[in-house]
Image (tube, rainbow, N blue to C red):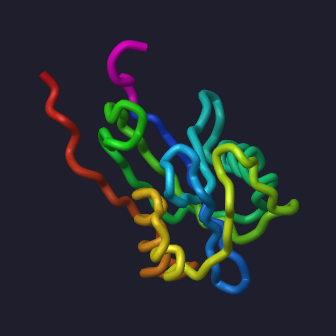
Amino acid sequence: MNGPPRQPEVVVGALLTNERGEVFVARFSKIAGHYAIPGGHIEYGETAAQALARELQEETHLTPTRFRLIQVTERICPPRYKDGQHHLVYLDFVVDRWEGTLQLDGQELTEGQWVSPEGALALPLTPTSRRLIEYYLAVGPDGPAHYAPDSPPLERS
């Protein structure tokens, strides 16, 4: 495809939380040296819930059984994403129940760890994972879902 995509791309994120109040992060192969939460693009014809389940299964071998939307954010032309010419809309979910045994795919995610939200913020996180964990820490596990816009879109000629 020549030039930037003509529509925003929708991405789901899964903030896994455990009974100790920890969150799960792992090394993210697409941004060297950074940690991220599991997630990925919604495919055509897939609901956000189906994409969340598919991405978690692919990356962690877990199937979510209880989750809720916590945050909707946007990144308009993020410089570290591919060619920097994409508009991404993130639907982030807190996942606090699942089936299966955690096993990372070893490709997109490696070296996973459960840490306190504060501990996660001390790690080099991807910008979107950092924004999500900061919000989660501010409002707690039962906080309201919210929308957080990014910078305004680039002017078009």
| Residue 34 screen position, x and y as percent | 50, 58
Asked if 139 appears above or below 100 in the picture, the reply is below
State which region is magenta.
1-7
Residue 15 as seen in the image, left or right of residue 133:
right
Reply above or below: 80 against 155: below
| Residue positioned most to the top | 2
Q: Position of residue 99 (x, y in %)?
A: 85, 62
**Taking 68 as reference, is 76 above or below it?**
above
In the picture, the quarter occupied by the C terminus is top left
Q: Position of residue 25 (x, y in %)?
A: 61, 65
Residue 53 visible in this rendered orientation of the protein: no
**Number of marks drawn:** 0
**Residue at image coords 41%, 40%:** 81
Q: Position of residue 86 (x, y in %)?
A: 36, 34
Q: Is residue 25 visible?
A: yes
The residue lying at 49 percent from left, 71 percent from top is 123
Is residue 16 located in the magenta-colored stretch of the structure? no
Residue at point 43% right, 72% down? 135
Q: Is residue 35 above or below residue 29?
A: below
Left or right side of 43 for 63: right
Q: Residue at x 23, y 50 (%)?
A: 151
Screen quadrant of the N terminus = top left
Q: Which residue appears farthest toward the front when viewing the image?
A: 33
Which of 107 and 56 lies nearest the eye of the viewer?
107
- Snapshot quadrant of residue 111: bottom right
Q: Residue furthest right?
A: 100
Q: Nearer the viewer, residue 111 or 128?
A: 111
Chief SS of the magenta region:
loop
Q: Is residue 5 left or right of 99 when viewed as pictured? A: left
